[in-house]
Image (cartoon, coloured by chain):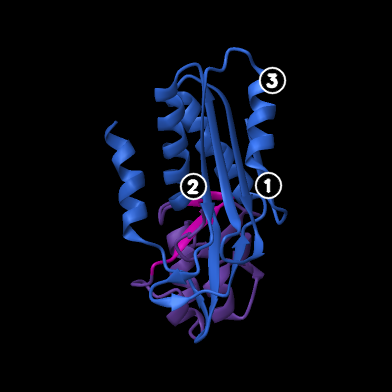
Chain colours: A purple, B blue
Amino acid sequence: MQVRILYFAGLRESLQAAGETVQLPAQVKSAGELRRWLVARGAPYAEALAAGRPVRMSVEQAMARPDTPLVDGAEVAFFPPVTGG
Amino acid sequence: MTVRVQPEDFDCGAEISAIRRRDPRIGAIASFIGTVRDLNEGLGVATMTLEHYPGMTEKALASICEQARARWNLLETLVIHRVGTLRPTDQIVLVVAASAHRGEAFAACEFIMDYLKTEAPFWKKEATPQGERWVEARSADDEAAARWLDR
């Protein structure tokens, strides 16, 4: 499965990337599993997306939970808690 | 139901006049404007830059307005949120809710704002005398949104 990942705000700066397209191994099927898979890549993901960090996720432009399933071609985003308004 | 995300400023009076004239069933219009303060967390703020997630932002705001319309009998809702670099005293956001009677307009305006604060993908970065910093989310905003769950 292939997904397009976007990073916003402080996460984009920490990772020095606005986004990337990745090919996922078969066992990565949810937003939470994708986060753990990215962390396992090491720096800078390991720190920026570490389990204790307040990171929010979206799948197909809707807020996601760790168990939200991924589909092939999905747009997934990682970002800090929102601060608009 | 209108949602706009734009760098340009807005005119609350003109927006409300347009809503009022469109629908004679309207008897109450509540509005909220959020503005840029010159002080946050003890530091002076020279500019504030708002980033967002194009596409998701509009969907999230539309979804929040849909939820408000499912809760209350609303005749119109409007959300305008600015992006880009703003200065103290500038307007950031406008929320308008129109209904036949005031109770629903007041409640919907506050609900939309509370959910916008926690669900819409915007991020603020401040320029202060000590450099730039991302504004951190406030737990008070989560609590404000959560109290609607029991209502």
User: Tag 2, which chain?
Assistant: B
Residue designated by label 2:
B116
Residue B48 in picture, x, y percent from top left: 58, 68
Q: Residue at x 47, y 31 (%)?
A: B68
| Residue B131 drawn at (x, y percent) | 53, 85
Can you say whether B75 is above or below B127 in the image?
Answer: above
Earlier-in-chain disc, 2 versus 3: 3
Q: Nearer the viewer, mark 2 or mark 3?
A: 3
The percent position of residue B125, horizontal first and vertical second, equals: 55, 71
Type of secondary structure dominating the magenta stretch: strand
What is the three-letter code of the residue carrying label 1?
Phe
Secondary structure at numbered mark 3 = helix
Say whether residue A55 is magenta: yes
Q: Where is residue B7, by image quadrant?
A: bottom right
The residue under the point 50% across, 38% down is: B64
The segment highlighted magenta reads A54-64
Give the residue pinned by disc 3. Answer: B22
Q: Which disc, if any, is residue B128?
A: none
Give the distance between the C-alpha atoms of the residues marked 2 and 1, in whole angstroms: 18 Å
- Give B34 or B150, whichever is nearer the viewer: B34
Dot 2: element: helix
| Direction from residue A68 to residue A6 in the image, left or right | right
